[in-house]
Image (cartoon, rainbow, N blue to C red):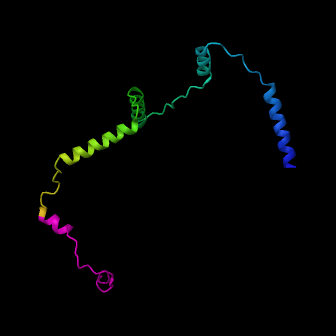
Amino acid sequence: MDNMHDDLLDDLLDSALRRRSVPPMSAHLSVRIIAAAEAMPVPRRAKAGGFWAGITGFLDDMGQAFLVPRPILAMLALLFLSFAAGFYNEAPDFSPGVSEADVVEFMVIDDQFVVSEFLEVSSL
C-alpha cells in the first residue's frame, strides 16, 4: 500500500517538474548574477530598542567594517599576546597584609597525609 502511494507521489512530482517552465538563460554571466541576487530575500535586522541592542548593532557594524580573513588566527595571536603581556607584567598585590611566607605556608603539601585519618568521623 505504501509503495503504491510512494509511486503515485513520485509520478505527481515528475509531472509537476515537467510542467515547470525554465526561463531562458542569458548569455551574459553578469546579468544572471544580478538576476539571482535580486531574487534572493534581503534579511532584515529586528529593530529592538535598548542598550544591548545598540551595543550588538555597533559590534555587528564593526565586524562588517573590519573583515579579518582568518579570524581563528587573529584570535590565536591575541591569545598569545595576552599571555605574553601577563607574564611580562608583575602580578598586582591585592592583599598587602599577606607575606610571601604566608602564601608558601598555605600552599605547602603535607607528604605525610593519611587518608584514613582524614576520613575518621571522630576528627570532624
Q: Quarter of the image for the C terminus: give it.
A: bottom left
Q: Which of 28 and 82 is in front in this view?
A: 28
Residue at image coords 31%, 43%? 79
Can residue 51 be seen here? The reply is no
| 105 vs 48: above or below | below
| 123 vs 108: above or below | below
Left or right, 114 with respect to 33, comes to left
Q: Which of 32 and 91 is in front in this view?
A: 32
Residue at image coords 71%, 16%? 24
**Quadrant location of residue 115?**
bottom left
Over which residues does the magenta segment extend? 101-124
**Quadrant location of residue 59?**
top left
Left or right, 43 with respect to 19, comes to left
> Residue 81, how many percent across, how many down?
27, 41
Left or right, 91 with respect to 27, comes to left
Question: Which residue occupies the extreme bottom position in the image?
Answer: 122
110 part of magenta stretch: yes
92 part of magenta stretch: no
